Structure formats: structure tokens, C-alpha cells
Image (spheres, grey):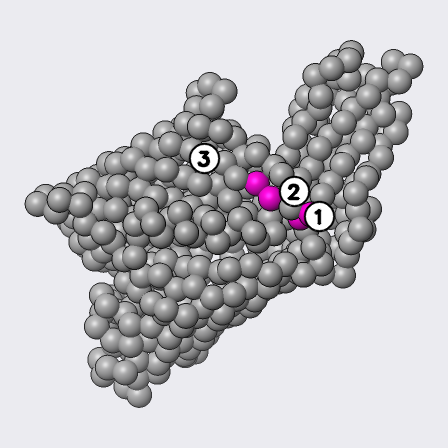
Amino acid sequence: MIRTDGCCCWKNAILFVLCLLPAHAAGLMAQSADSSGPSPYGRLIREIRIEGLRITREGEVRGQLASQVGQIYTEETARDDLRWLDRLAAFSSVRAKPVVVQDEVVLTIEVLELPRLLLYPSANISDENGFSIGLGAKIPSLLHRAIGFSGTTRFGGATETEVSMQTPWKLRGREWIAAKYSYRNRANKVDSFREDSHELDLRIGTGFRQNWRLSGRFGFLSLVSDTPGITISSDNRDNTPALGAVLEYDGRDLPSNPHSGWQAIFDITQNGGFLGGDGDFVTTQFDIRRYQPLAARHVLAFFSYATFQSGNVGETVPVYRDYDIGGRNSVRGWEKGARRGNNQFLNTIEYRFEVFRPKAFRIRSFGLYIGLQLAAFGDLGTAWDHGSEFTGNMIAAGGFGLHFLVPYVDRIRVEFGFGQSGEGAFSYFSIREKARYSRRRVR
């Protein structure tokens, strides 16, 4: 027996891919040096040229280059050039073309910028609310500085609106700011109420060393329930401020499609309590990801994500802030809500084989791409309130699927999971990498 979760099916996957292809690309298709001619590595860089810029300031690109005039050009700096330009998220393709001239290197960086205003179909898929689709708009390089500004509105399984702004993580330059506002109206099927919520997340931080970033976080969640007994407050509305800190490490080779490297996120947040509002609990999260190349087209991905919360659910922690696991973004092969608790621990090992790497192409002046991966995975997780429940609530599953690498959403996952006894196969149609969506409150 195959269980279809939400609206996922092969027809939906194909239609969604076709829907996205006419959209403008928002991921980096990086290409390194040509192999023809003498090797440029180990030679002094005489000149660096930037070609293809129409919107973004040239200084923003040069500031992301590890390669510098007067220094030696190496394979490591060539890889770092592409990695850091990827983080700007302002280009659909980047090509490094080093040429040896009189025993020195003239390095040309060719970029294909995204349009000034990017319009695209926007979709979200969750286990509780299924498929929501609408429109999105993004300015990839606000003020010509690669500052991303976007807004989306979606309807269907849930009504959602999001507006976000983020400055790029820079190789040179310390300041970093990100802000996101979300509105959500949906049926919370796990806790049996209808949610109407507004959520704000503001982060201000600084980079230190090459791959590290530290930021302070301020959040605010206002949630209204149509059912008594859901909120901490007796008037069915919770207003919960949050204050915390986030430490991040990102050593991935290419964030848009990683094949090697580590990523780690640690954050701790006080919700309510001395900040005022409703509720009083501390949330601590550990998120570790490893991408291990095995061969040219073979990659192992490891994800481990743990969340711990102080307080008691229904007293200082509202019931909608506990964790339910099972489903497309926690433990695939189990129904959503198979295990619940104030804490969670999720682990994944995923083997990926690239049928073909993302291929860049153009439609008029727009840069697009598509790629395809085969995947096999194993998931292991638990959710618990008391320590004695940790092992008893452990569930495991495995499965396989296809990952389409496409513009803007980075990947579309069509997967089949097996694990829950007597339920057969669960089929999932999901977007973005699982580890990214595991962190969301609604997943």
C-alpha cells in the first residue's frame, strides 16, 4: 500500500517543475576554470576583471573574491571565489576564466545577474496543511549591494504572507542584518484549532574569521486560537517576545548545492518570562550538517538536529510550541504526530547520486538551470518530555526518491518512506532540503 501524504504525486511534481522553469533562476550555477592551456595555478595574479554586471556594484563582487591581485592563484582560492559569490545570491551563473599571460594570471569573472525584479510562483508544503501556492517577488540586489528583499503570498492549504530582507554574508565586511515577517492562517490539525498568527524575526550580527558568524536575535509571535485552552493566556491570544543569540559556521563548498563541507548552527532563545508577554521557556538548538563526497557524482549527507526546551507544555510552554515528529521534514515513513514532546532529536543519513549536475541555459536574458539526483535515506528521531521517554519514543524509517534541482527553491523532493508498521509506503512531494525545513515551526 502506498499512502499519499498531502497533495504529493508524480503529476504534481512534474507540473511544479514545469511551472518553475520559466521563472528566473535564483541559485548559483558556478563553473571553474577551463582546462585548456597552461595551468594557471601557482602563478601570480596580474589582473582581475569582472564582466556582466548591470545592477550590482563591482565592489560587492570584488569584496567576495579570495583571489587578489599580487597574490598566488591556487585551486583553493578558485573554489573559495565561487563559494563566496554563491552567498551573494544575486547571480544565476558565475564563470571563472583564468588566462596565463607572460607567466602571470589574468582572471576574468563572468556573471549573469538576476533581473532587477524577480517574479516567480511561490509554493509551500506542510504535513498538516498540504499544498499552498501563490506569487512571489524578489529584488536580488537592493541598492546595488546584493541585499535580498522579497515578499510572497500563498493560498490553498494555508493562507500565508511573508516579507523578508537580508544582507549577504561577506568574505570582507562584518555587519549582517536579516529581518522576516510572516502571517499565517491555517488549521492546526495536530492540536485541533485554527491559528491566526503574526511572527517577526530580526537578527543583527557580525562575521568573524572566514566561515563564522554571530548574531543577536529578537522575535515576536502573536497567535490567536479559535479554541479555548490552546493559548497560555485566557483570552485565546498569546503575545510572546523572544531574545537570543545565534552562532553559525558554514564551510560548505557551494551553499546552493553542497557536495562537501560542514555547516553548524547553535542558538539559544528566551521566550517570554522576564521579557513579558505569555509563556516562559528557553529554547536551545543544535544543528549539525556534513556533506561528504565519495566520488565524482556520489555524496553522503549527514544531518543531526536537537532541540531542548525548559518548562512544561500547557503551563509555561504553549501546546502549539511542542514538537511532533513524523512526516516529510522530520522522520519520513511515519505519519505526522507519531511522537510528541517538549524536546526533539532528528537524524538523517542520505546518499545522493547526481544523474546530471545542474545544467545552465538561457531563455533570452534569463539564466535558468535544472539538475537531477537520485537519493536513498535513513531517518531516526525521537520527541520526549521526560528523559525516560527518550529511547522509548525513538522511531526509524528509510526510503528513496528523486531530487530535482531547479531555480529559486533549490530542490524539489519526490520521495517514498517506509517505517511505520502496517502503513506501507508514504509518498512525499516536498521542497528544499529536509534539514532546512526541519527547523521550521510549521513543517
The foreground one among 115 and 175 is: 115
> Tag 3 or tag 2, which sits nearer the N-term?
2
Q: Position of residue 265 (x, y in %)?
A: 48, 46
Say which element carries label 3: strand
- Circles 2 and 1, Cβ within 8 Å, touching? The answer is yes
Which portion, as a residue range, is magenta? Answer: 364-369
Say which element carries label 1: loop
Task: Give the numbered dot on residue 365.
Answer: 1
Furthest-right residue in view?
102
CA gap, disc 2 and disc 3: 18 Å
Residue 65 drawn above or below residue 390:
above
Q: Nearer the viewer, mark 3 or mark 1?
A: 1
The foreground one among 201 and 342 is: 201
Which residue, given by chain and number where applicable, does mark 3 sit on? 372
The foreground one among 14 and 276 is: 14
Which residue, given by chain and number where applicable, does mark 2 sit on? 362
Image quadrant occupied by the N terminus: top left
**What residue type is disc 3 on?**
Leu
Residue 425 drawn above or below residue 339:
above
